[in-house]
Amino acid sequence: MDIELRNIHKFYGPVHANRGIDLTVQAGTIHGILGENGAGKSTLMKILAGAVPKSDGEILLDGRSVTLAHPAEASRWGIGMLYQDPLDFPPMTVLENFMVGRPRHPKRSARHWAETLAGLCVDFGFRLDPEAPLESLTLGERQQLELLRLLSLGSRLLILDEPTTGISSEQKELLFRALRRLAHDGKTVLLVSHKLEDVENLCGRVTVLRQGRVCGTLEAPFHARDILSLMFGNPPAPPQKTRRTFSERTLEFRGVSGLGGRAGLRDATATFRKGEVVGLAGLEGSGQGVFLRLAAGLQPPVHGTIRLFGNDVTGSDYHVFRRRGVAFVPEGRLEEGLIAGLTLTEHFALAACEPRLCVPWEAARRTAQERVDRFRIRGGPETTVDALSGGNQQRLLLSLIPPEASVLLLEQPTRGLDVESSTWVWEHLLRRADAGATIVFSSAELDEILMTADRVLVFFNGRILLDVKAEDAHPDLLVSAIAGRVSL
Amino acid sequence: MVALGGASPLEAYRHILAGSLGSWAKITQVLRVWVPLTLCSLGLLYTFQIGLWNIGVEGQVVLGAVGATALVRWGLGAPPHWVIPAALVGAVLCGGLWALAAGVLKTHAGVNEIFAGLGLNFVATGLLLWLIFGPWKQPGIASMSGTETFPQSYWFPTAGGWAVSPEAVVAVSALLGMVAWSLRATRLGLALKAIGRNDQAAFLLGLSPPRWMLLAMMLAGGLAGLAGAYQVLAVYHRLIPNISSQYGYLALLVVMLAGFRWQGIPFIAFFFAALNVGSIQLPMMLRMDSSLAGVIQGSLVLAALAVQGMAWRRRTAS
């Protein structure tokens, strides 16, 4: 099936997730869709699968314009999507899951479908016991089942969202073999991933999305550098910074491992000093998030020690870290950082944390007004935080950091902000660094890291692969470290 | 439904109205129900504010009643002006600790507070029945009619001819004001509101959600315990199997219909109390079963919820 997307737009409220995407995919090919988290690739795929409606644009299948209002309609057109977490029913058996979602057919019994399933399994070399409860299957096996189910429904376009996350390498081999064969049979495969090796292995063409737009299409053979420069933009040469030296240690990681994220964090050792700005680079979920959360005391490490100003704080909880001067600004502003429905004043009253019976509303209102002016937040003390724009929410979060905090940990501090807000955020953060704060932040934008950081740590698959001063961090070096190709 | 029962619905409503508000004496009877119902509802404000479903009010009322009974029995012979306040304090503590048990199960063992509360309700009922038929049974016989009636000097004082003591009504009104004030002006209110809306963010801002959850549970349990003490000291003057009169569950409805805000609670509680008292008329006047009052109550609640839901949808749509 040939697919053509013309000028697809998608708005989620004020968020413009897809900004005029054009994409052509030919039948019988495996086409990769690459992009960082938030680039708009999942949204685009869900539009194609009928799971979310598009705001504007046109979808052509084999030259015919179609509306895909819901997944069942997409399925009738032969589009099947394999989600990262397969949408199946764990309490039911493999066979029952296989039979779900098909039109009733009077002559086809469970036995018929069992035979179909067995036949398909033989074809693709999968081993699935039809009577086994789904719960007993590994993620890879559930994926295989879902793939067969979509094929038996007559899918001619298969969309796979991050299919190689969480499955074994044998399962990955089986899956790739199956996908190559399907493409050979004339089916179309769209592979969403941010793993370069999957794409290089499998795809004939790849389209890279960035911030809701297509920023380039490449043909095999690919060069990692080309792909990454499309994904991250062309990193400018680092500005000539004054060489500063930092001496006083603030935060130290010694052989720290932790759980969470895609890869967890393994054996991380790093030292941060007073006044230093350190950027954490890497593909989404390579360990930066876990690193920041461990550094904030939000989760305990599995191994290793964490020190703050020379004191061992391993295993202490967040409140201890906070009292010792650590501030954490999460990526999800309204999900984790702010309380929707509460006003600015209420936030400042909460953050003041005074052990008094009555809330000093008047003082809180004054603080709020003062911070609104100083941080140029567009809103007033009585505005609820969910009515603020993303940029203003970020300013509010920064203004909520206690003035005495000396280690600032920030997840993607400028994600989704316009240029003016980003510039403002960094002016503010760099001023705090000049005043002696240690700033550690993760970012998906290499330019941001190179422009602001004194030092860069590159994460790959849960490990710190590179720890360099910004002036030694050539963009090529960073890019190959992000792709996991650097020999130490 | 009433029409199906063979009576005119309008007639039924008229009798309910007359039976509850027809005379001053009737109104004091309604207030006698209003007092414990409002107490339970006020406590629930705290738990709803922090996002907890304290289904265990019922058990907390029972424990309050048990605590008050225990103290009065223990203090028989002592001056009533010592015993009655002690019984009230004891009831608050018992109710609060019972709620704390549900809270600890939630915060430290990860048990959903709804299940913990329901489970503890059964335990409380079991305890109550055991006391009535066991250690506290009337001399010679154990019966559903409850424990021995307290000497009159240990009853909660009432004004002449009234079914309710004016002091209780005043005290509950004062508590209403205090709860409203604490939710609006104190750190408690702010913390509960913040945690109820986003515990993750509240945690990052420096609060300890589990501690506040336990405090909210204790406050709710304490007020429910007070309601239990009222049932024992002022209404039945003894411990009976149905000491809670299901006010715990009814209070959940009251708070929901009040939109989880204190302003509506006294009125909605009064409405339910009136329905409760007024429906006693139905069997006498229309030869209908008084359980039909439950049907009327239920239909009204559903209708109110439907109207609220529709209003909410219209608001979100616009």
Image (cartoon, coloured by chain):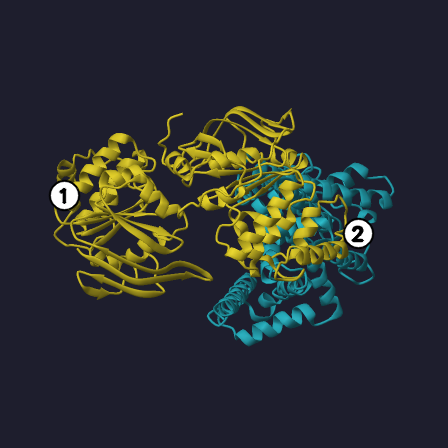
Chain colours: A yellow, B cyan
- Position of the N terminus of chain A, as image quadrant, is bottom left
- Expressed as whole percent of the image width and height from the top left, the position of residue B110 reads 53, 37
Q: Quadrant of residue A222?
A: top left
- Expressed as whole percent of the image width and height from the top left, the position of residue B177 reads 75, 58
Which SS class for mark 2? Answer: loop
Residue at the spot 25% in from the left edge and 30% down from the top edge: A170
Tell whether A115 sits left or right of A299.
Answer: left
Tell whether A133 sits left or right of B201.
Answer: left
Which SS class for mark 1? Answer: helix
Residue at the spot 34% in from the left edge and 53% down from the top edge: A215
Q: Nearer the viewer, residue B230 or A431?
A: A431
Residues under numbered marks 1 and 2 in contact, where contact means CB atoms less than 8 Å apart = no
Q: Amino acid at mark 2?
A: Phe
Q: Nearer the viewer, residue B98 or A59?
A: A59
Tell whether A380 sits left or right of A265.
Answer: right
Residue that badge 1 annotates:
A116
> Numbered disc 2: what chain?
B
Q: Amino acid at mark 1?
A: Thr
> Numbered disc 1: what chain?
A
Q: Nearer the viewer, residue A336 or B120?
A: A336
Q: Nearer the viewer, mark 1 or mark 2?
A: 1
Rounded to the nearest whole Å, what is the CA distance between mark 1 and mark 2? 78 Å
Residue that badge 2 annotates:
B156
- Expressed as whole percent of the image width and height from the top left, the position of residue B78 reads 86, 39
